[in-house]
Amino acid sequence: MFLDAAAAQALADKILSRSKADACAVKIDGGEDNSLRFARGTATTNLTTSDLRLHISAHIGGRIGAVTTTQIDDDALTAAVRRSEALAAMLPVDPDYSPRTGPQAYEKPQRFHDQPDALRLDALATKAAQAIAESAQAGVDAFGCANGAQRFEALATSAGLFAYEPRSEIDLSVTARHRADNWSGWAGAHDYDATRLDAPAIARLKSMGFIVVGRGRSQPVRIPATFERAMEVGIRALPIVTMMSITVGMMLAIQGIYSLRIFGAEDQVTIGVAFSVSRDRKSTRLNS
């Protein structure tokens, strides 16, 4: 079940108003997921699921009792709040307890586009039909899966905090198989905005198999689309790869310096990090 910010806050306020604890926190998450599979020109299976989950925690004298429930009727909410309070009363005091956070300012979510109709099964079927039609023009059979979802997370506390983050996403993967069954290829895409997902382009790309054998089999080769995907997964990934490399190096240095201190060899930590990284890369090449 997908709730907008107003509905999520109304539900959280209803729960907080029932609490008799020193403080109370409520986390709500849920959404709607749609999935469609297709093969040989037609849909084979489709599925829609909807879920909603509440996590209620009561804070009493530095102790925290928590309960999770999926029921949102008044009696169930009251029972869950009372149960969390009873659990808190039975637990020992947490020496690291910190009070709940008050009101905060958050940036607008960047992973949500309010377009539920574009994520439902009929819209996914349209995307699949476009991929199937493009594959048919190329003379190959198409198999694949399309998924669309709208989900959210909300957090509210009795101290006045309310945070809400929605998320929408769509993805399409297509496997192309030559009708003589002597080669196949795969391509896919994921986006938070359904209007940006180009099903025909994904079907055209398929895989590098189009470059290797497509022309020889009188099939269309889209070089620009291939290089666009190479840029997306290669050059544009350099910032995150660089950040991960720096983080791994820092963690190795932090952990290694404590071990080397026993031997009075803290100044050798840079050499140790260098050997760790180079050996890891060597083993990766050998295993691949």
Image (cartoon, grey):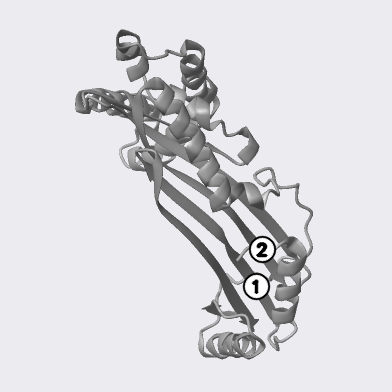
The image quarter in which residue 82 lies: bottom right
Q: Residues within 10 Å of mark 2 (few under 14, many from 20)?
A: many
- Quarter in which the N terminus is drawn: bottom right
CB under 8 Å between callouts 1 and 2?
yes
Question: Which amino acid, by three-letter code, is at mark 2?
Answer: Ala
Nearest to the observer: residue 237 or residue 138: 138
First reached walking from the N terminus: tag 1 or tag 2? 1
Disc 1 marks a residue whose amino acid type is: Val
Counting from the top left corner in percent of width and height, residue 88 is at 56, 85
Residue farthest toward the top in the current orientation of the protein? 216
Image position of 285 with respect to 40: above or below: above
- Residue 253 lies, in percent from the top left, at 42, 35
Instruction: Identify the residue at image location x=53%, y=39%.
Output: 127
Q: Is residue 179 above or below residue 110?
A: above
Question: Does residue 50 show up?
Answer: yes
Which residue is under mark 2?
154
* In this view, 163 is above or below 247: below
Residue nearest the observer in this picture, 159 or 96: 159
Whether residue 188 is visible, yes or no, is: no
Badge 1: residue crowd in 10 Å (few <14, some 14–19, many ≥20): many
Q: Nearer the viewer, residue 204 or 111?
A: 204
Eyeballing the image, is 216 above or below 111? above
Disc number for residue 26: 1
Which element is circle 2 on?
Answer: strand
Alpha carbon distance from label 1 to label 2:
8 Å
Estimate the x, y position of residue 67 in percent, counting from the top left.
Answer: 54, 80
Please tell me how many numbered marks the rendered image carries.
Answer: 2
Q: Which residue is depicted at the point 48% across and 14% down?
A: 227
SS at badge 1: strand
Would you say 171 lies left or right of 162 here?
Answer: left
Measuring from the top left, give residue 103's x and y in whole percent. 79, 63
